[in-house]
Amino acid sequence: MVGTEGVDAAKAIGSAIAIGVGGLGPAIGIGMAVKGAMEAIGRNPEAAGQIQTSMIIGAALAEAVAIYAFVIAIIIAIVL
């Protein structure tokens, strides 16, 4: 199509921003959660199982945000 280069470029930039910003928050959050869990296990090794379970559930919930950002980036790139 003629004259759609600007629209295609805007879609690419929008998708990149959506996945970049949407992935940054969960990555930082998961890193902080793992850091806290490792420190807690170091202080109280007997509670490692409970701490690890809670950390994995929290990481999964944080990762869901990144998946939503990925879906939005796909929608921007393909549908719009």
Image (cartoon, rainbow, N blue to C red):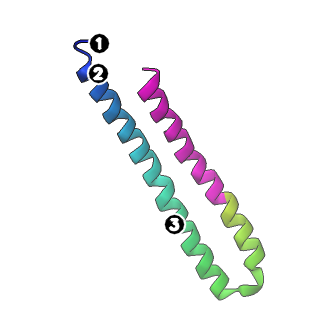
What distance separates the C-alpha of mark 3 from that of mark 2?
36 Å
Report the mark closest to the observer, 2 or 1.
1
Q: Which residue is mark 2?
A: 7
Q: Alpha-carbon distance for marks 3 and 1?
A: 44 Å
Residue 26, given in percent of the width and then of the height, sits at 51, 54
> Which residue corresponds to the image point at 43% horizontal and 53% vertical from the top-left?
24
Magenta region, main secondary structure: helix
Residue placed furthest toward the top = 2
The answer to whether the residue labelled 3 contacts the one labelled 1, judged by CB atoms less than 8 Å apart, is no
Read off the residue under disc 1. Answer: 1
Neighbourhood count class around disc 3 (C-alpha, 10 Å): few under 14, some 14–19, many 20 upward: few
User: Foreground residue, 44 or 21?
Assistant: 21
The picture quadrant where one finds residue 8 is top left
Task: Name the residue at 69% across, 58% down.
Answer: 57
CB of mark 3 within 8 Å of CB of mark 2? Answer: no
Q: Position of residue 75 (x, y in %)?
A: 48, 27
Q: Is residue 64 magenta?
A: yes
The mark nearer the N terminus, 3 or 1, is 1
Q: Residues within 10 Å of mark 1 (few under 14, many from 20)?
A: few
The x, y position of residue 45, in whole percent, is 72, 86
